[in-house]
Amino acid sequence: MVETATKLPIKTEAKSTPVPAAATWRPFDDLRQEVDRLFEDFGQGNWIRPFRSMQPLFRTADWTAPAVDIAEKDKAFEITAELPGLDVKDVEVTLRNGNIVIKGEKQEHKEEKSKDYYLQERRFGSFERSFSMPDGVDSGKIDASFKNGVLTVTMPKTAEAQKPVKKVEIKAA
């Protein structure tokens, strides 16, 4: 007996979209992610994470925004900025258009000569931070001091700003 072939209907599905390049298998990217994860888990984020970005692995300071505290006291406002490694000659405080501007610049040069090697390193960094001067500041008496890498800018309040706050009673309508 001869068997006759049975024709089956062919179902066509809607044209599928191509797989995006990001979904394709990339073994080196997967390996990099695993190594990064291992370093993060092992050192709880404190170890150097390889393959992250092309930024330097060791950074001495982030000069774009040094740590700053701003406090209001009874008789003055106070800005305290941490500027490690800087000298008083490297820091400048100015008043400009109702703003207090703190600028700093650090230049470091290191040179070592030995019989076997010669090492020369240069580092440079600068920053500028600007703060709006609050109302009630006596701009003629602003004072700045620098000690052990900490800059303190004291902005005394005017007599009017030092008066106690008057509480206004709210009446029910």
Image (cartoon, rainbow, N blue to C red):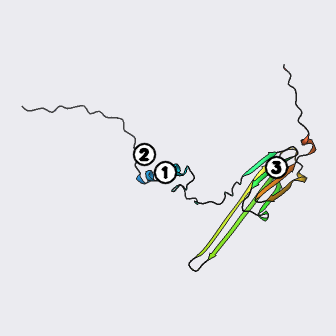
On the image, the x and y values in percent for residue 24 come to 40, 48
Q: Single out the residue that lies furthest toward the front.
A: 42
Residue 136 at what x, y percent from top left?
88, 44
- The span from disc 1 to disc 2 (Cα, nearest Å) is 23 Å
**Above or below, 137 relative to 166:** below
Q: From the image, tell me which residue sits under label 2.
A: 23
Q: Quadrant of residue 64?
A: bottom right
How many other residues sit within 10 Å of disc 1, few (<14), some (14-19) or many (≥20)? some
Marked residue nearer the N-terminal end (3 or 1)? 1
Q: Nearer the viewer, mark 3 or mark 1?
A: 1
Identity of the residue drawn at 74% across and 51% down = 68
Residue for point 41% across, 52% down: 27
What secondary structure is found at the residue carrying circle 1? helix
Residue positioned 36% across, 35% down in the render? 14
Q: Do the numbered discs 1 and 2 sit on residues whose CB atoms are within 8 Å?
A: no
Label drawn at residue 78: 3
The residues bearing labels 3 and 1 have C-alpha atoms spaced at a distance of 44 Å
Between marks 2 and 3 in the image, the one whose residue lies nearer the viewer: 3
Q: Quadrant of the C terminus?
A: top right
Numbered tag placed on residue 38 in the rendering: 1
Nearest-to-viewer mark from 1 and 2? 1
Give the mark, 2 or 3, whose residue is nearer the N terminus. Answer: 2
Look at label 1 and name its amino acid: Leu
Q: Position of residue 106 (x, y in %)?
A: 71, 64
Q: Residues within 10 Å of mark 3 (few under 14, many from 20)?
A: some
**Residue at image coords 45%, 47%:** 22
Q: Amino acid at mark 3?
A: Glu
Q: In the picture shown, does residue 133 fall above or below 94? A: above
Marks 3 & 1, CB-CB < 8 Å contact: no
Q: State which quarter of the image contains the N terminus.
A: top left
